[in-house]
Amino acid sequence: MNGRKPFWRRPSWWVAAAVAARNVNGLRQVRQTLARVDRPVPLSVVEPVALHVVIPVLREQLHIAGALAWFVPLLRDIPGSTLTLVSTAREERERTHLVGRLAGATATDLTVQRFPQLTDDELTALAEALAKTGERTLTPATAAEVLSAFPTTADVIASEIARLREPVVRHVHYEGDGRKAAQVNAVVEQLAADSAEEYVAVYDVDSRPSRELLRRTAEFLARRRAEDGELPCVVQQSARFATQDAADNRWERALCRSAARAQTLWTLRREIPNLRRYTESVRHTRPGLRGLAQTVGHGLLVRTDVFRQVGGLPTFTVLDDVAFGYRLTLGGMPVDSLPFTTTVPAAEYLPELLSQSERWFQSYLDYPQCAGRWHAQGHGSRLDHTAALAIGAYRGVAWLLVSPATAACLALALGPRTRLPVRATAVAALWAATVAPVRLLAEAEGRPLTVRETATQSVETLAGLLLKSIGPMTALGRWAVTGTRHSVLAPKSNRRTKGRETP
């Protein structure tokens, strides 16, 4: 005997086996989801349900006209529907903060990467103003003068609505300090609707739901009404993610594509199956907590009476959408995942991608605060909150470990001293996370891949997985160092991509 431990007694084997088991189960979920969603089916003619579309906006002047051009024709065909764009006074306060950050900036500092909150035109104007002064750095006065020449989002909305004169379009300006959730709640407070026959529909300014999507949604709602005797409480339109290759660097474009594909696979592998299992358990098993709903803030439809019943979107957390799912879970309310998806823009630049990932992970850090607040208000038992926190912690830790687990399997697969069974298990884990789902996704979209395309996209997806945990780690590190998870600036960039402008 050579004295070496059996491979199954080594930690490396158990790491590879655990990752392989999770990835193979995830691959199974992707396969099952693709068999259910986006299937071509004939559409029935049904009466559409009134939608009160709410689009919260911040620093999105360039996208108001496009959003109006898209949504107004859609909502004209749905009687009783409205479109509300809700701006916020936070934009003016954040502009003042940006002036302070711009003070001392040089010409080379005025980039999208350094100031993603500013538009390309604003950055160009700042650079030109700096050149005219003959100074090396911007002064607060110069920065303030340049930015004040550009209209705020509220100004643009008011101008566009005055030009359109559309009765279905409204503008609400939120004066408080809250973020997206507070903006949406401010709109709903002004809605006359409070019934089980109408929905609040939350979309982002760059969301582009098609007529077919809304027709299929109406048919889905009619089918659920026929089965349950009432319209669904909450409906989630899940999304796939896609980039427009806006970055100048090839490697940056590839990384952002990989992250978009990895996020799409997460939607198919985790988001949709989790919602489906949760809703089925709520509808068909004994009362009590069954899973944890995880809603997403774009393409979220909430019956107006349900929205008010649960107190609207939570404003005491850093983010609102996942926390809203926690509140729905405590109320035992089903969240129906539509059997079809839409496509939304993904991050185009690496700093934006990392910031977005960090921001999304904040939702998992919000769960303890949700438990404390809602348990004190009498929503849910101690056991309910314990179960919800355990599920949330598992999901958060799983995200946090994606990159380390992928890196460990890659090292085991390539390591010259790795035992054959361990190497084979590590390779299986990587294959189930990259090659197999990439091919499944392409086949479902009707575009089978060549060997070269499979290799390229699999490597890109691997890169996306290796990058995936950086945002969560940054969120935890920033919290540990600063003691707070709140930031002066809303951590989103000024969107630079434009959607199709024909519904």
Image (cartoon, rainbow, N blue to C red):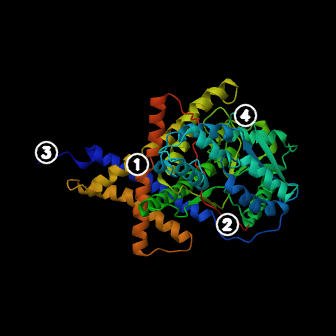
In the picture of the structure, the residue carrying the numbered disc 4 is 176
In the picture of the structure, the residue carrying the numbered disc 2 is 500
Badges 2 and 4: C-beta atoms under 8 Å apart?
A: no
Residue located at (64% from left, 65% from top): 38
Image-based side of 16 in relation to 374, left or right: left
The disc placed on residue 127 is none
Badges 1 and 3: C-beta atoms under 8 Å apart?
A: no
Indicate which label's residue lies in the foreground, 1 or 3: 1
Identify the image quadrant of residue 445.
bottom right
Image-based side of 48 in relation to 357, left or right: right
| Sooner in the amino-acid sequence: mark 2 or mark 3 | 3
The residues bearing labels 1 and 2 have C-alpha atoms spaced at a distance of 34 Å
In the picture of the structure, the residue carrying the numbered disc 3 is 3
Indicate which label's residue lies in the foreground, 1 or 4: 4
| Sooner in the amino-acid sequence: mark 4 or mark 3 | 3
The residues bearing labels 2 and 3 have C-alpha atoms spaced at a distance of 65 Å
For label 2, the crowd category at 10 Å Cα-Cα, with few meaning under 14, some 14 to 19 and many 20 or more, is few
The residues bearing labels 4 and 3 have C-alpha atoms spaced at a distance of 69 Å
Indicate which label's residue lies in the foreground, 2 or 3: 2
